[in-house]
Image (cartoon, rainbow, N blue to C red):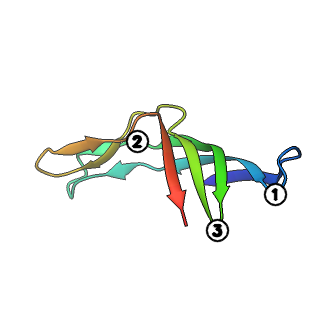
Amino acid sequence: MLALEYSGALPKLIGVNGFIRGEWYYFGKQYFDLSNEQVQNGLSKCSMPVLEFPILFSAFSVWLRNVTDTHYIAYAYDFGASRLGDPYKLWGEYEV
């Protein structure tokens, strides 16, 4: 994982800090069963926050997840069931 971030006070909004951050993840080759027949080659994903609102002692963030819209298998089982990873999406979170 590699993350780069710059943060500082926004000049026109007194008492409000802003930041920009980019995250890059690399996942190596993955095997999903004991016989190593279900395999996924290495892949990379990127995510970034769009904005963050501080609220008292907490914050609300809005993120872009999987910006490159990488298609991948999140998990798989020996009996054939699997789940694909989440596609590109806008996502919000509330942090205390």
Residue with the mark numbered 2: 41
From the top left corner, tell me how far across and down residue 14 is, in percent: 85, 53
Task: Name the mark on residue 51.
Answer: none
The answer to the question of whether label 1 and label 3 lie on touching residues, with beta carbons closer than 8 A, is no
Q: Are marks 2 and 3 in contact (CB under 8 Å)?
A: no
Viewer-side residue, 91 vs 3: 91
The tag earlier along the polypeptide, 1 or 3, is 1
Instruction: Tell which tag, 1 or 2, sits nearer the viewer.
Output: 1
Residue positioned 25% across, 52% down in the render: 36
| Front-lying residue, 84 or 58 | 58
The quadrant of the picture occupied by the C terminus is: bottom right
Image point (58%, 53%), residue name:
60
Q: Amino acid at mark 3?
A: Phe
Q: CA distance from mark 1 to mark 2?
A: 46 Å
Amino acid residing under circle 2: Asn
Viewer-proximal residue among 40 and 70: 70
State the SS at label 2: loop
Q: Amino acid at mark 1?
A: Gly
Callouts 1 and 2 close, C-beta under 8 Å? no
Q: Cα distance, mark 2 to mark 3? A: 42 Å
The image shows a total of numbered marks equal to: 3
The image shows residue 85 at horizontal and vertical percentages of: 36, 41
Residue at image mark 3: 57
Q: Residue furthest left?
A: 79
Q: Say which label, 2 or 3, has the lower sequence index.
A: 2
Q: Which residue is mark 1?
A: 15
**Position of 38 compared to 20: left or right?**
left
- In the rendered image, the vertical position of residue 58 relative to residue 7, given as above or below: below
User: In the image, what residue occupies the spot 50% across and 52% down?
Assistant: 93
- Report helix, strand or loop for mark 3: loop
Is tag 1's residue or tag 2's residue first in the polypeptide sequence? Answer: 1
Whether 2 is drawn above or below 82: the answer is: below
